[in-house]
Structure formats: C-alpha cells, structure tokens
Amino acid sequence: MGLAPRISSSWASMKIEKSLGSSRAAAVRTIFALLVGCFITYLLLLPLFYLFQTIAHLGSQPRFRPLIHEIGEDLIKHFAGSRDCGINQADIYLAPWPTNPPVSPFCKDRATLLEALSGGVRYGFDEPYVGKCWWTLATSERLANTRQGCTYKWVPTPEICMILERFNSIVFVGDDIAQSIYAAFNILLREDFALGSLKYWDMTDEGWTRCKCDNQFIDSECQEYAIKSLDEVKSKASSRKASPYFCERIPHAYIQMDSAPASAASISLFKDMMYSKPNPWSPSPMIFSFGHGSTLDIPTTTRALEEWTGLATAAERNIPMLFLGPPAIGMNKTAGTTFENRNLAVWQYLEQMAPIAKEKHFDVLSLYNLTVQASTADGEHFGEKVALVEAMMIINWLSKLETS
C-alpha cells in the first residue's frame, strides 16, 4: 500500500518537470521569434527612417533661388560695403531674359561654358560682361527671339556653398592673377565688398580706410594683408573684427608661385592641401595662372605646367585643372615696362599656350575679352568688379565638374 502512492507521486512529479521544461522551451522560442521579428521589422523600416530624415534635412535647408532669377533682382546688395564700394549687381552682371519657348540661357557643360566665357564681350566700356553670342542682345526683345550661345550664372552664396561641398579642397596656384581671383573668391564667401579679401584684424584704422574696395586689388601695400587660406580666417573666428565665411567646411588656399621650378614652400603647401584627403576620387580642383609670373614667356610657363602637372599626378587624386589665360593690357600701361608689344604679346601667348595646356589635361579659360574693355588703374591691375566676375566664372566652372 505504501509503494503505490510513492510511484503515483513520482509519476506526477515527472509530468510536472516535463511540463515545466516544455514551458521554458516554448518561452525561449517565443522570445527568439520576437527578437527575429523585431530585427526584420528594423531592416524593413530602416529605409523609411532615412527617407524621412532626408526629407526633414532638405526641409531645414535654405530655399535657393530658381535657375533664372527675376529681372532686376540683386543677389549682392546685402554684402557689407556694397554702398561704400559702389557695387551693385546691375553694374557687373547682365541677367538674361527668359526665352519663349523656355530655353535656359546658361551653358550646359564645361566645354560650352569655357568657349562662351573666353569669347564673350562687353557691349560698351565697363559694361557687364556676357557670354559669347549673347552680346548682341541688348534688349529684351532681341534676347527673347534668340537661342544661340550661352552665358554664365550669377550664383547666390548659399548655392556657392553647395557647389563647394562636392570637393575635397580647392587651390589657386600662380601669379598675381590667381591671387586677385582668390581674393574675390573670399569676398564672395565672406559677403564683404569692403575688406573681404584681407586679414583686417591685423590692420590699423588707417589701413582699414586705405585698403577698402578697389584698393584691395590695386594697392601693393594692402596686399601684405591678403588672405592666403581659409584657415587664416577660421583661426580668428572668435575675433570681433573677423568676418566669418558663409560656409567654411571645404579648405581652400592661394599658393604663390614666382618661379619655375616652384619653391619648396609652395610645393609643401600644395601637398598638404591635396595629398592627404581621405577620398581620392572626390575632386580637388586647381586653378593655375602664370602669364604675369613668366612675363608671357612660353618656355617658362611650359616648364611650370609640367612641374605642376607632375605634382597633381603624383597625388593619385582626382585633380581637375584650369589654366587661365592672362588679361589684356590697358592703354595706360607705361611703355617699356614688364610687357612689350602690349596686347599682341598677350594674344600670342594664349594662342601658343592653350594647346600645350590642353595636352596636359588642363581646361583653358581666357581672361582677355573680359578685360580688354575694362578700366584699369595702371594698365595691368584691375579693380574689384573685374575680379568678382572672374571669381564667379571660376565658380561656374567648378559647378560643371564631374564628381564621383
């Protein structure tokens, strides 16, 4: 009698243990299934999360202006010094009128852009410069009935920043022409016509007055304060006198070159800017000028091109290169100084150098037509308005570069 209850009790205990074991296994399977389900749901929702995040990011960005701006719209009137320097957009840029049917007046690619800008004209002394084949369109009626040629776009500062974001870095290499264009490049990014190309935190009040506006480009003493790189401004970001950049993520610099071969310091700066970037396929454009630096000497310029092409190739990076033909020489240039034969020498220099530069994989932009009908204080150096147009032409070229 005592054995049966014990067997029955043992059997019941075994059934309970088996039941508990089955419950634990079921719980583990349920938890595992839930984890797998959550992971799969996460994978399915991840693209939607990024989509919503992208939409939110785009919604938070400033609204950029349409391709063709409204006639008479001034995109630079808010720049510091606009009134003091007497600069408004109508003085330096002729906005094309929309055509009917709608056809964009802006150049569609690098080749047409460079051809249009190299071959453009002013339809009067110091009038706004326009691209090739647009120069005859002095009135809205004539422009509305024409579909030939193209011109460049005046890009607002936020859009300039969008263009620059596509690059690792940007360098301007060469003589005073490259330096003056880099100065205007800084003016556009700092939105400051008065002193935007200068380290004016190092200047006295007298220097502030002396070096404003055009004197940033034509007064040799003011050149001592010229900005050479983005880092020079960023390092003074906390200074009350420093004018910050509208955007400052992409490094840029001017690398002075006075001779061929270049100095060790210039080469070292170029390597610092170009060789150490993490993405070798993202472009790092180089804008090159050496017409004034070589005194329009073909062999000297050719040696310089070979040297800098070699440096660019050794970087094993994507480095688009732009060769700048020199500007025209004004009639008030003193005879017998620096350049003989005046504009004939400039024209012959570009005719001989353009095919050499193209053979070395440079794009070529001539500044001759832009400057031949522009005012110059000494026949050789042009003022702020010309430099701003040159910088905007460079920005248009940058916008047409292919990126990985």
Image (spheres, rainbow, N blue to C red):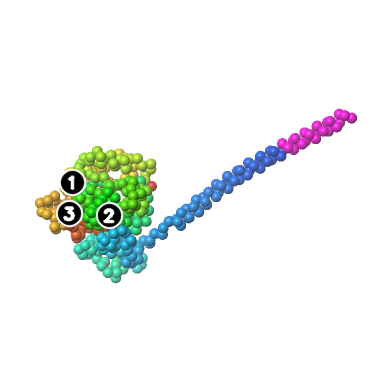
**Residue 160 visible in the picture:** yes
Tell me which corner region of the image, top left, top right, bottom left or bottom right, holds residue 258.
top left
Q: Residues within 10 Å of mark 1 (few under 14, many from 20)?
A: many
Whole-percent x, y for residue 279 in the image? 38, 43
Whole-percent x, y for residue 360 in the image? 26, 45
Tell me which corner region of the image, top left, top right, bottom left or bottom right, holds residue 370.
bottom left
Label placed on residue 380? 3
Dot in front, 2 or 1: 2
Q: Residues within 10 Å of mark 3 (few under 14, many from 20)?
A: many
Number of labelled discs?
3
Does label 2 or label 3 sit earlier along the sequence? Answer: 2
Whole-percent x, y for residue 202 in the image? 27, 49
Q: Residues within 10 Å of mark 2 (few under 14, many from 20)?
A: many
Q: Quadrant of the N terminus?
A: top right
Q: Main secondary structure of the magenta part?
A: helix
Cα gap from disc 1 to disc 3, whole angstroms: 15 Å
Q: Which residues are magenta?
A: 1-21
Q: Could you say whether the residue bearing mark 1 is in a helix, strand or loop?
A: loop
**In front here: 84 or 37?**
84
Residue most extreme to the right: 1
Whole-percent x, y for residue 51 in the image? 49, 53
Q: Could you say whether the residue bearing mark 3 is in a helix, strand or loop?
A: loop
Dot in front, 1 or 3: 3
Cα gap from disc 2 to disc 3, whole angstroms: 22 Å
Residue under label 2 = 195
Label placed on residue 294? 1
Residue that appears at 12% across and 53% down: 341
| Three-letter code, disc 2 | Leu
Query: Above or below — where is 110 with respect to 74?
Result: above
